[in-house]
Amino acid sequence: MFTRLPDQIILHILSFLDAKFAVQTSVLNKRCRYLWTFLPVINFDEASFQDAMSFEDFVFSFLSCRDTSTNVFNVNLKCHKDHTSIHRDNHVVYYIIEHVIDTPSITTNIEVLTILAECVLSKLSKLSVCTSLTTLKLSNILSLTKNFDIPSLKHLYLCCCQFVVGRVNSFDPFKGCVNLESLHIDRCSYHDEINTFIISTPNLLDLNLSRFFVDGEFDEDYCVIELQTPRLQYFKYDGYVLYCFSTEINLLFVEELYIVLGWLAKDIYSLYTLIELFEIMQRAKSISLSSNIIEVSIFLLSNYDTLQYHSSTRIELQCCLM
């Protein structure tokens, strides 16, 4: 029954499978034997292999044997910490990126690239040749590239990544992503010393910062996050402590503000930091705060001048467990 379906439908079904299973399914039938070489979506998952070497060999063989004239829209790579070495991850990731940027049928058509691997990545800038790439997801990488200069990107997700920056006064890593609409940074760290971390993305709508590190620790006393995001609508900050935020523009379109903190000192500095953030986000229509922010704010406001914040139409107070 499966083999009676049109090739395009079979390819669509195989696109949901890991590449290894897609090949195994394809070669079972003489008619579909080479159909896997035309896959428009490529999923590599190291979990389906017994060891790292066999996974590496499979990736190399698969990419060298596929039909390079076939348009590829989505490439996904998942390596697992307990199953492979960083050295082998580097080989696989580099080979995949080289294949992506050197194959015209992929370079001009790829929309989504996902890399989940513990590796040292120094070729991020080369992805700028992928004019159709709109979504990039990176997890567990150590990047030697400071900036994301990929103009076509609309969605960028960074999880558990490390970036080697060096000592800089101001750092603006996303200025080359002029079309970026959503930016999620989760448990990422930036080394070494940064005085001002700038997010200048003219079309950004959704910003999510979770457990953000500078210099490997929460260096909130020395680093200021400057927002140059005139179209920002949704902002979420989830961290142990609160960084100072600043902006030189009016954020006129903010609708939702969501802040969760693991710890907040009961001092005037914390109050001023909160006030500055509220002033920046004063157009917000909905504000969600973790319980400790509310408790500390009540304590501080009972001892200092009243905080006035009348711009929001609705304030939503909620308890968020860390």
Image: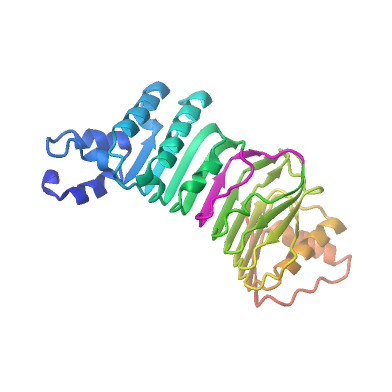
> Does residue 58 lie above or below 106 as drawn?
above
Q: Residue at x 14, y 49 (%)?
A: 5
The image quarter in which residue 141 lies: top right
Side of 256 relative to 195 (left or right): left
Q: Is residue 156 left or right of residue 48?
A: right
Q: Quadrant of residue 61?
A: top left
Residue 166 inside the magenta-drawn segment: yes
Seen in the picture, residue 318 relative to 26 is either above or below; the reply is below
Residue 267 magenta: no
Residue 285: % across, % down: 63, 74
The one nearer the camera, 263 or 117, is: 117
Q: Position of residue 181 (x, y in %)?
A: 54, 61
Taking the spot 83% from the left edge, 66% from the top edge, the residue there is 301
Q: Main secondary structure of the magenta part?
A: loop
Residue 67 in the image: x percent, y percent?
27, 39
Look at the picture and state if 156 lies above or below 299: above
Q: Is residue 7 left or right of residue 191?
A: left
Residue 6, visible in the rendered structure: yes
At 69% from the left edge and 40% from the top edge, which residue is drawn?
A: 165
Residue range of the region highlighted in magenta in the rendering? 145-167
Residue beneath the point at 21% across and 50% down: 8
